Image (cartoon, rainbow, N blue to C red):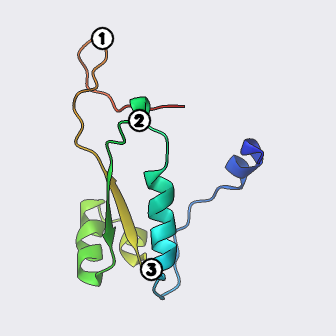
């Protein structure tokens, strides 16, 4: 696969159909995230799947009222609490592997 054409095709979706996403599709997305490379293979992330409409509204509020977030039928939040990555100046950073 050529990487550049895929990067150029990327879009930001802001409108969603009012239908549920099947669990198999959600599982495939989570599996892709789980298998993504991480610095030193630490895989410091955890995924939270939000489908409940009330919780999606709360998440929308946490995202500074971005309506498209709350309108999505599924929200997958990627979280990390890793604080062991510091730059030489002591500033915390997130581990990125390319």
Point out residue 93 in the picture as x, y percentages from the top left corner: 32, 28
**Residue contact at pointers 2 and 1, CB within 8 angstroms:** no
Q: Residue at x 42, y 79 (%)?
A: 73
Point out residue 91 in the picture as x, y percentages from the top left corner: 25, 21
Q: Report helix, strand or loop for mark 1.
A: loop
The quarter of the displayed image where residue 41 is located: top left
Q: Residues within 10 Å of mark 2 (few under 14, many from 20)?
A: few
Q: Residue at x 36, y 42 (%)?
A: 43
Q: Is residue 81 left or right of residue 49?
A: left
Total of numbered circles in the picture? Answer: 3
Q: Of marks 1 and 3, which one's residue comes earlier in the chain?
A: 3
Q: Residues within 10 Å of mark 3 (few under 14, many from 20)?
A: few
Which residue is labeled 1 in the image?
88
Point out residue 9 in the picture as x, y percentages from the top left corner: 71, 55
Foreground of the two, 26 or 57 = 26
**Residue contact at pointers 1 and 3, CB within 8 angstroms:** no
Q: Residue at x 65, y 55 (%)?
A: 10
Which residue is labeled 2 in the image?
41
The residues bearing labels 2 and 3 have C-alpha atoms spaced at a distance of: 27 Å
Q: Report helix, strand or loop for mark 2.
A: helix
Q: Residue at x 76, y 48 (%)?
A: 1
The residues bearing labels 1 and 3 have C-alpha atoms spaced at a distance of: 43 Å
Which residue is labeled 3 in the image?
23
Residue 98, above or below 81 = above
Q: Nearer the viewer, mark 1 or mark 3?
A: 3
Q: Report helix, strand or loop for mark 3.
A: helix
């Amino acid at each position: 696969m050529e990487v550049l054409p895929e990067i150029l095709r990327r879009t930001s979706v802001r409108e969603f159909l009012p239908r549920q996403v099947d669990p198999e599709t959600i599982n495939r997305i989570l599996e892709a995230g789980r298998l993504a490379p991480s610095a030193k293979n630490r895989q410091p992330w955890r995924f939270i799947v939000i489908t409940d409409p009330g919780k999606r509204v709360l998440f929308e509020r946490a995202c500074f009222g971005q309506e498209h977030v709350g309108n999505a039928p599924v929200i997958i939040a990627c979280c990390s609490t890793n604080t062991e990555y510091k730059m030489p100046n002591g500033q915390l950073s997130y581990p990125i592997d390319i």
